[in-house]
Amino acid sequence: MNIYEFHTAEDIIHLCRKHKLSIGEIAKRYEAERSGKSMPAVRNKMKQTRDVMYEAVKKGIHSTQKSKMGMVGGDAYKIYKALGNTADMMGNKVTVRAMAYAVAVGEQNACMGRIVAFPTAGGAGVVPGVLFSSAEHFKAGKRKLLNGMFCASAVGLIIAEGATLSAAKGGCQAEVGAGVAMAAAGLTEMRGGTPEQCFHSSAMALKSYLGLACDPLGGLVEVPCIKRNALGCMVAIGASDLSIAGVKSFIPFDEVVLAMKNIAKIMSPKLRETALGGLAVTKTGNMIKRKLGMKITPMDL
Ligand code: SF4
């Protein structure tokens, strides 16, 4: 067994205490051990990931291009523009900018741009949204942002191993839910939270997404996916705030992951990326299916 190997939140918290390191630092060392790469090489790989994410955000906030079906496109631009007058908004600059960034990534994906599936394409907006916007707010150095990303990736690994990151297996809790849990922990680490606080924020965030249907219109990763990422940023930031304020999740993170696995097992296949239930079979959803030449599915009521 590798020195920094972990499978659960409990494992990683134990490692953090033992080595007096943060979750992000443990994740970095584990990746170096596991891959046989040097620490600078592991850091460089994460820098490349960050750069691709930044590119998607930068392109997305300035684009008004619509997706092929015309369902999405141009919203990141609108939200980013609204930052010029946050007096009209209830959210602050950090949250509104996080939403703009998250939507930018989703819209780039829908318009065939390049993104990082972190943890998946459908849930790819939350981590860059939350971490980049917060890093701008803190004027955080590159190191802090990278540590937040490593911390987020550790949470993703634990979910992948303990439950799933596949919407076909677990619905949207496995995509946007996982992204929100990852972003909450990453942000909490960037704010100087303890490893325990990071997992309390992840647990609180993930609990809010348990059982969420994967029901994209026409099977395309557009509606409701992109706006779910935007609002997921608010949940991640809120969960991090709760945990920094001292609020704890009554249910430990590892148990939340187990609950997620259990829900995935009993979830109807109609709500697992098949476009056979939920929003996908609403009147609007069926209109999109018709346009795409797909079979119309009546809603079971
Ligand atoms: S609704 Fe389905 S396709 Fe869309 S983000 Fe959620 S899991 Fe992914």
Image (cartoon, rainbow, N blue to C red):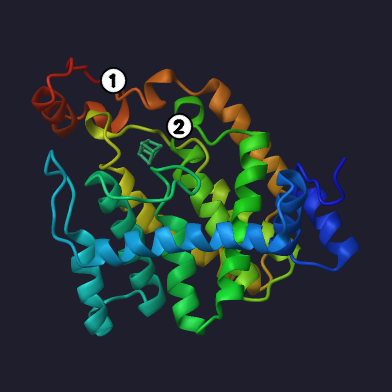
Q: Amino acid at mark 1?
A: Leu
* 269 is higher (above) or lower (below) than 69: above
Residue tagged 1: 301
Relative placement, left or right, of 177 versus 300 is: right
Within-10-Å neighbours for mark 1: few <14, some 14–19, many 20+: few
For residue 167, the mark is 2
Marks 2/1: CA distance? Answer: 23 Å
Relative placement, left or right, of 17 versus 63 is: right
Measuring from the top left, give residue 224's x and y in whole percent. 29, 43
Q: Quadrant of ligand 1?
A: top left
Measuring from the top left, give residue 206's x and y in whole percent. 56, 48
Residue at 57%, 22% (x, y): give it: 265
Relative placement, left or right, of 77 versus 41 is: left
Residue at 54%, 21% (x, y): give it: 266
Q: Determine which quarter of the picture holds residue 40.
A: bottom right
Question: Can residue 157 be spotted in the picture?
Answer: yes
Relative placement, left or right, of 275 versus 183 is: left
Measuring from the top left, give residue 166's x and y in whole percent. 50, 32
**Nearest the eye: 61 or 256:** 61
Q: Check disc 2 and report its element: helix, strand or loop.
A: helix
* 175 is higher (above) or lower (below) than 17: above
Residue at 46%, 41% (x, y): give it: 175
Residue at 86%, 55% (x, y): give it: 14
Q: Amino acid at mark 2?
A: Ala
